Image: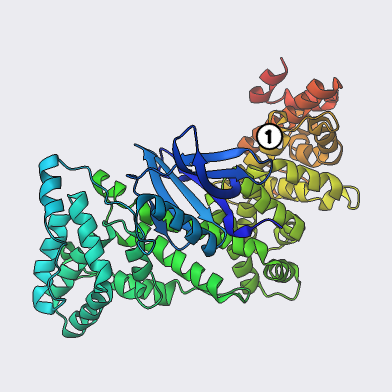
Amino acid sequence: MTDTRRRVKVYTLNEDRQWDDRGTGHVSSGYVERLKGMSLLVRAESDGSLLLESKINPNTAYQKQQDTLIVWSEAENYDLALSFQEKAGCDEIWEKICQVQGKDPSVDITQELVDESEEERFDDMSSPGLELPPCELGRLEELAELVASSLPSPLRREKLALAVENEGYIRKLLELFRQCEDLENADGLHHLYEIVKGIFLLNRTALFEVMFSEECIMDVIGCLEHDPVLGAAPRRHRDFLTKTARFKEVIPIGDPELRAKIHQTYRVQYIQDMVLPTPSVFEENMLSTLHSFIFFNKVEIVGMLQDDEKFLTDLFAQLTDEATDDDKRYELVNFLKEFCAFSQTLQPQNREAFFKTLSNMGILPALEVVLGMDDVQVRGAATDIFSYLVEYNPSMVREFVMQESQQNDDDILLINLIIEHMICDTDPELGGAVQLMGLLRTLVDPENMLATANKTEKTEFLSFFYKHCMHILSAPLLANTTDDKLSKGESSIPCTCVCKDDIIFDLAMAHCKCVRGLWITTGCKRLSDAHLEQYCLYPRLSQLFT
């Protein structure tokens, strides 16, 4: 049986400061003759190929984060991370790294990060560790100045971070924050804002883990409400989080760790997006660990939910149950929408597996039920979910609708439901119709269809679409040119919906794309003379056939 302790994902940091997944494998350490030293080796679990071969450099700063991550830089602008399935495996590899570098495994960073001048480095290294003033109300101004003066220097930042971490300083600061709020001490609150903002810029995982803990995070947010620029009018972020944006479990989450992770991630994301001031270019690089903290939390949440079959089964069962009330259904479909949005943090191969899991659980039949409901908000959220599926795995959607046609009549097929919603959009701005048209174009576009020796998706799907969907797609086209007269503005179609000329044109374009695809893939010209005559009544369309 494979040792899951050493199972890891390999990540590299791209130019946009986002982590790219390079594959899953098993990590080991050993001497590599070519590199002349002890190295980390990761072999892919799929085929045994080498995903990573990295010498453990005695001078490289390795960091251990969140118990299951090891992060380091091999060269300028080339950061690597190993994300372990189990804490025990992370600890084992961390001990190997520390052994090579002669470090105590209890540390969470093996080297001090320096990029200062020789003179500054000598002065800082020869000085003792940074000493913090007592955590007292009367010393807050002094501490704020110390934090501000330390940020420009990597060595002083590191010494400050160690001092804050080792002395348990964050919890002491938050106790002072509560005192300042009780005493309405504006000066103290302003100093605490500067101090806590500075601690974020120390870019240290160990400090984030304390700040983002359940008992501390709301007080941290409270400190960041008191920006001196705002004077006596602090922002009310805590009120928003506790009263307006309260987390509601639409389906009971049995795993307390998962529940806590969801709470934490939402709040940390809120801190990054809404609470922290917009960082300068200098500060942006100092918040990389915060971005990574959120990224890996989201990856973990998606994985935990994906593996919870009971949760997903209950979710889809309640979503499609006729007894579910409208408010509950709206909450369920919005949760599923957020769940799919989280999947954007995954790399393509993992995202494909994620949507495959949702497909196996019945997401497409569930969406078909929801899209057939009257509630506009519910249908809108369901459309957003459908757009994720079409964007990331259009072949999965095509396969479903073709299989569905073997059991159901044309008028209740999912894809025809999409077409009907598109041509019956009552929004004056046609926002929903435009979104659905984009999805339909993606589905009928021959350029993104698969073609293998055993299966030609182009031929199968386009033939299916022409046979089962084209009569619905072309209905407003034919209705709009009845009696050889081109109606102006808006015109009624058989489903009593209103279809504007822009949508008529887009419908025809989709029709033409499908037909052209058939011509190319089958050589069969199936566009009838009747359709051609109707299209040529439109000046904008006639050019397509001349």
The quarter of the displayed image where residue 530 is located: top right
Q: Residue furthest bottom?
A: 182
The picture places residue 49, in percent across and down from the top left corner, at: 63, 38
Quadrant where the C terminus is found in the figure: top right
Q: Secondary structure at mark 1?
A: loop
Q: Residue at x 10, y 74 (%)?
A: 139
| Residue picked out by circle 1 | 487
- Dot 1: few (<14), some (14–19), or many (≥20) neighbours within 10 Å? some
The picture places residue 178, in percent across and down from the top left corner, at: 24, 81
Q: Residue at x 10, y 42 (%)?
A: 119
**Depth order, front residue of 124/195:** 124
> Against 286, is 276 above or below?
below
Is residue 338 left or right of 162 when viewed as pictured? right
Q: Residue at x 15, y 58 (%)?
A: 148
Q: Residue at x 62, y 77 (%)?
A: 254
Q: Residue furthest top?
A: 546
**Depth order, front residue of 199/96:** 96
Q: Does residue 281 show up?
A: yes
What's the amino acid at mark 1? Answer: Ser
Is residue 89 left or right of 70 when viewed as pictured? right
